[in-house]
Image (cartoon, helix red, strand yellow):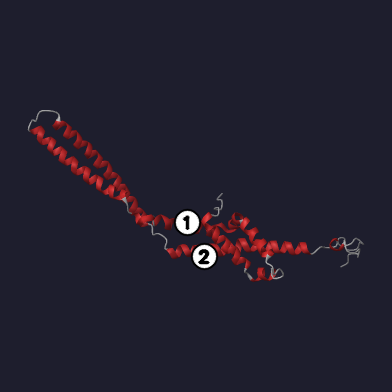
């Protein structure tokens, strides 16, 4: 079972903006018009912000799409434009090692052919073969890096306007499917609580809302 992604810290500001947008919707604004001091609106906003993860999970697919596109765009644009010391070393190490290995092997071979006494010819040959091994290994690493870069470039990265469009779609879904239903539910519950029903209607029991003032029987 796929769980909805949790709201990222960097997206909390977008969630707060969605809450403010929902509070400005016509029916919510009309329902809050009876409270000119804005206490009810502040209470609704605080309640929605406290339930950010739950409300954001109401329609998780747009958020999942937005996170995927945003992550892909960030991977395609690393800090510094992808340059630096490591790419230069990946190119230079095989070249320098291979050139040095060839030179050492050549000198060692010449000295051996000239029957030069001492360990120098053997040492030069051993160093040459060591550098040849280094050149081969670093060349394989550089080749793997080039192949990886080529494969990543084959996948077309998302354009900035695609990421922004996905962000707008997510915020709209957040308002319509998460925040607005929650605010309307809270307002409906408050309206029902404000109307105290008389039960049962044919008794002489005072209505609870008026019990402290008089003993007028409940009526329809």
Q: Position of residue 53 (x, y in %)?
A: 59, 54
Q: Report the number of numbered marks.
A: 2
* For discs 1 and 2, the disc positioned in front in the rendered view: 2
Which quadrant of the view contains residue 77? bottom left
Q: Is residue 211 left or right of residue 13?
A: right
Q: Which residue does the image show at 53% across and 60% down from the upper left?
A: 62
Checking the image for residue 96, the label placed there is none
Tell me which label, 1 or 2, sits earlier in the chain.
Answer: 1
Which quarter of the rendered picture does the C terminus lie within? bottom right
Q: Position of residue 136 (x, y in %)?
A: 25, 42
Q: Which residue does the image show at 34% across and 50% down from the upper left?
A: 148
- The answer to whether the residues at label 1 and label 2 have Cβ atoms under 8 Å apart is no
Checking the image for residue 68, the label placed there is 1
Q: Is residue 75 above or below residue 39?
A: above
Q: Position of residue 137 (x, y in %)?
A: 27, 41
Q: Which residue does the image show at 19% across and 42% down from the upper left?
A: 100
Which quadrant of the view contains residue 41? bottom right
Q: Mark 1 Cα within 10 Å, few/some/many (few <14, many 20+)?
A: some
Q: Secondary structure at mark 1?
A: helix
Checking the image for residue 168, the label placed there is 2
Q: Secondary structure at mark 2?
A: helix
* Residue that sits furthest to the top in the current view: 118
Q: Is residue 202 left or right of residue 191?
A: right
Q: Whole-Å distance between the Cαs marked 1 and 2? A: 14 Å
Q: Which residue does the image show at 73% across and 61% down from the upper left?
A: 189
Q: Position of residue 50 (x, y in %)?
A: 63, 55
Q: Is residue 164 above or below residue 97?
A: below
Q: Mark 2 Cα within 10 Å, few/some/many (few <14, many 20+)?
A: some
Q: Is residue 157 left or right of residue 35?
A: left
* Residue that sits furthest to the front in the current view: 37
């Amino acid at each position: 079972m796929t769980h909805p992604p949790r709201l990222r810290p960097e997206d909390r500001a977008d969630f707060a903006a969605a809450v403010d947008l929902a509070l400005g919707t016509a029916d919510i604004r009309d329902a809050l018009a009876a409270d000119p001091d804005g206490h009810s609106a502040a209470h609704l906003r605080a309640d929605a912000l406290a339930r950010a993860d739950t409300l954001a999970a109401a329609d998780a697919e747009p958020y999942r799409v937005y996170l995927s596109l945003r992550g892909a765009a960030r991977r395609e644009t690393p800090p510094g434009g992808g340059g630096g010391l490591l790419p230069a070393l990946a190119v230079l190490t095989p070249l320098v090692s291979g050139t040095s290995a060839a030179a050492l092997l050549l000198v060692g071979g010449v000295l051996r052919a000239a029957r030069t006494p001492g360990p120098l010819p053997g040492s030069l040959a051993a160093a040459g073969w060591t550098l040849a091994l280094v050149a081969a290994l670093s060349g394989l690493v550089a080749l793997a890096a080039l192949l990886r870069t080529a494969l990543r470039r084959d996948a077309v990265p998302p354009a900035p306007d695609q990421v922004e469009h996905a962000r707008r779609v997510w915020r709209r879904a957040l308002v319509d499917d998460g925040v607005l239903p929650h605010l309307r539910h809270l307002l409906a519950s408050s309206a029902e609580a404000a109307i105290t029903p008389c039960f049962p209607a044919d008794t002489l029991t005072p209505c609870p809302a008026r019990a402290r003032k008089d003993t007028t029987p409940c009526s329809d």
